[in-house]
Each structure stands twice: as structure tokens, then as C-alpha cells.
Amino acid sequence: MMKKRWAVSLAAVMILGLTACSGGGTTGGTNASASTDSGQTQEEKTEAGSSEKENTETSAELDGEITFGVSCAITGNFPLAGQRTKEGIDLALEQINANGGVLGKKLVYVAEDDQNTQTTAVNVVTRLLNENVCAVIGPHTSGNAAATSDLYKNAQIPFMTGGSSPKLAELDNPYFFRVRPSDTINGQVAARYAIDTLGAKKIGISYNNNDFGTGGRDVIIPILEADGIEYVAVGHNAGDKDLTGQMMQLKSAGVDCIISWTDDAEVALTARQLYELGFDVPVIASAGVVMDQVLNLLEPEYVEGWYAVTDFVSTNDDDTVKQFVEDFKAKYGYAPELYASTYYSAAYVLADAIERAGSTEPQAVRDALAETKDIKLPEGVFSCDEEGNMVHGCVIAQIKEKIPGMVDYVTVE
């Protein structure tokens, strides 16, 4: 296993801010901290399987439009994720277009509802690729990104996804770009924090039997084995309604720490059932546990003191994050969470790539995305590596009274 060098300070990361773009010939991107007018949440009009072009207000005189696609879950079992995705993108485009757009044109998108299912995602992406788009943002989850990867590869159109499974990098798709940290990073951080900071000697791993959960598991286990740490790994399936058996297995094994790597509904169920069983050991969870859609399902005591490895918390005191939170609250009336941060940042990275490419040709945009370097945004510092990974750090958060607070920011080089 490759030995990683760790850094725990944002100050150690080289930062290059985006500069406001004013049309053709300008290099660089747009200003991530540009001010925005307060507005209302855009009504969610997109029906399942339909598309519509999303326009954001702009005071600038722009000549024409540049269109990209968005695949997100507006309905189905993940609707809040899709809503937050669109809110983040809408805010970014409002700011970008108010500051000169991209190549002097208005940046807009065509949205499709993938319902967070692989079959629908394939159909949605097929339609988007016929919409004369220069790139696509989405779909979000690892399974849906994997299911649609060949469509993008064959069409030679770049796509940007928040799917975090390390398996996505194995698809050998030069048009794939990951806009969140890979679980190669997140899993390492979780395992090392359990061992080095919490002093765990026997770790329970509770994981989802999908691309996301098994991807995280497969990163964590080799680290534990290399350090001689005992572990017990138990799996479950998306949609399971009772995890008592799995939690009792971990309790009976005498684990002194649990790493939970699963999706939103299942992490909420894990938290409730651990509490009901009186199983009180430190828990490190994947990112979903810090989001409102999970925390709103739980009593405070269910997750009090839990840790999470995530890419964004709105309580982060980093200046870029604080400005984003302020702008988001001004527009929508509440704080952003992970999906808004991810896809707000993705929209800025895409705008920067189009501007640097000086073209909307998908291949030129793809090449510019691959050259992205040191762009500081709420999601982190974006620098593209050879596998299409753009974010190389994550947040360690701890939940107190249902409020996730930042403990540290860790980069893996």
C-alpha cells in the first residue's frame, strides 16, 4: 500500500482564486466570492424524464448562451439532493452571469430528473447528450455514474460527478471528472482517525452493499490490516428497514469503534438502532450523517459526539466557505449543505474550463478540465489528477446537539 503524506492545514495548500471573466480572450474563470442579489428558491418544475433549460437572472449584457447538462434526482428517493444540487448551480450561474458570463455568453443548463435510479440515469444522460451540451454535471451517485460512464466516453463529452467510489477511477474514462474527494481519501482519513486519534483497537465496519459502501470498505480494511488492527465487517442493503442483527454482531464482537459507510436512510437507521441497543462507542460515519435530510430524522442523542468524514460543513470558518454560506443564505433563507457546495463548485470549475478552453467544443472543455489546478472553492481546492480526481482533501466533523462542527481539514497527497 502506498504510503501517504498528510497535511492538516489549508494554509499548506497553494491557492489560486478565480478571476472575473469578461469575454473572449480572457484566461482564468469567474470570481467565487462575487456578490449576488437576494432571491427566491426556483420552483422545481422538471418532471421525471423531461428536460428544461434553466436560466438565471443576470444584469450583464451577454451575447448568446452556452449550455451544459445536469442529471440529478429531483424525484424518487433522493429529491432533496436534487433540489440542493440545482440550488448550488443556480447560485453559481447567477454570480457568473452577473460578472460577464463565460466567453461573453450566458451560461445556462438543461436539467433532467434521474430519480436516483440507474435505468433512469441512463435514459436521462442519453437525452442530455443529444441536447448540444458542452459537458454534463451528474449523475451524483457512484452507481449511477458507473452506469452512465460509457455513454459519456462514447459521446466524448465530459461529465462531472460527486460519486466517491474509488471504483469509478478504474473505468478508464478520460471524460470522467470527480468533484468531491474520492473514498480513497475519505476511507483513509476515517481509518487513520479511528486508529491514531481515537485509539481504536478493534473496529467494526458497517457498510452498504453497493458501489459506494463496498468502495469505502475496500479502502478501510487494508489500512487496518497493515496496522494490525482487528476488525469485524458487516454489510447491509439499501432499503433495509432493520439493522439490529448487524449491530448486535458488532456489539457481541466487542468492537471499540465503528466506521459506518452507507447512504442517508441507512446511516439514520444505524444511529437510531445503536442508541436503542445501548451500544455506546465512538462512531465515524461517511458524509451523509452531517446533512439535514439525515439529522432531521434523528433525536439529538442518537448522533451526539459522532464523527463524520465529509467534504463540507457550513460551520467551517474558512473565508471561501463563509462567503458561500452568506450568499446561499441570502438567496434561499437557509444554510447550504454538501450537495449545494459540491455542485456550486462544479459549476465554477466548468465555467473556468470553458473560459480557458476559449471554446465550447466538448473535447476542448474536457482538455481544460484536465488541466484544472489550484482553484479554491467551497468544496475545496480543485486540482485535477491523471484519474480525473479534482478534490484531494476532506473535513473531519463532529456532531454536537445535531450541529456538525469542523474538527480538522486533511489533505492526502
Image (spheres, helix red, strand yellow):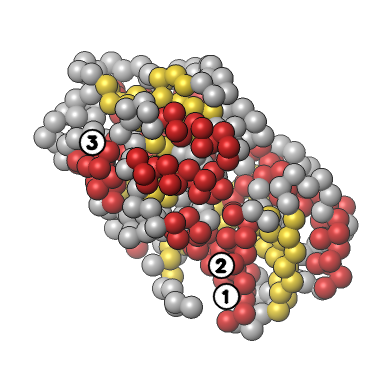
Instruction: Name the amino acid, label 1.
Output: Ile
**Image point 56% across, 48% down: which residue?**
143
Q: Residues within 10 Å of mark 2 (few under 14, many from 20)?
A: many
Query: Does 23 sit left or right of 259 as displayed?
Result: left
Q: Are marks 1 and 2 in contact (CB under 8 Å)?
A: yes
- Which of the two discs, 1 and 3, labels the residue nearer the N terminus? 1
- Which residue is identified by label 3? 361
SS of the residue under disc 2: helix
- Which of the two discs, 2 and 3, labels the residue nearer the N terminus? 2
Instruction: Name the amino acid, label 3.
Output: Glu
The quadrant the C terminus occupies is bottom left
- Which residue is identified by label 1? 223
Which of the labelled discs sits on residue 219, or is there none?
A: 2
In percent of width and height, residue 274 lies at 82, 56
**Image point 82% across, 73% down: which residue?**
254
**Image point 61% across, 27% down: which residue?**
75
Report the mark closest to the observer, 2 or 3: 3
Instruction: Name the amino acid, label 2.
Output: Val
Q: Quadrant of residue 251?
A: bottom right
Instruction: Identify which residue, 226 or 154, lies in the foreground.
Output: 154
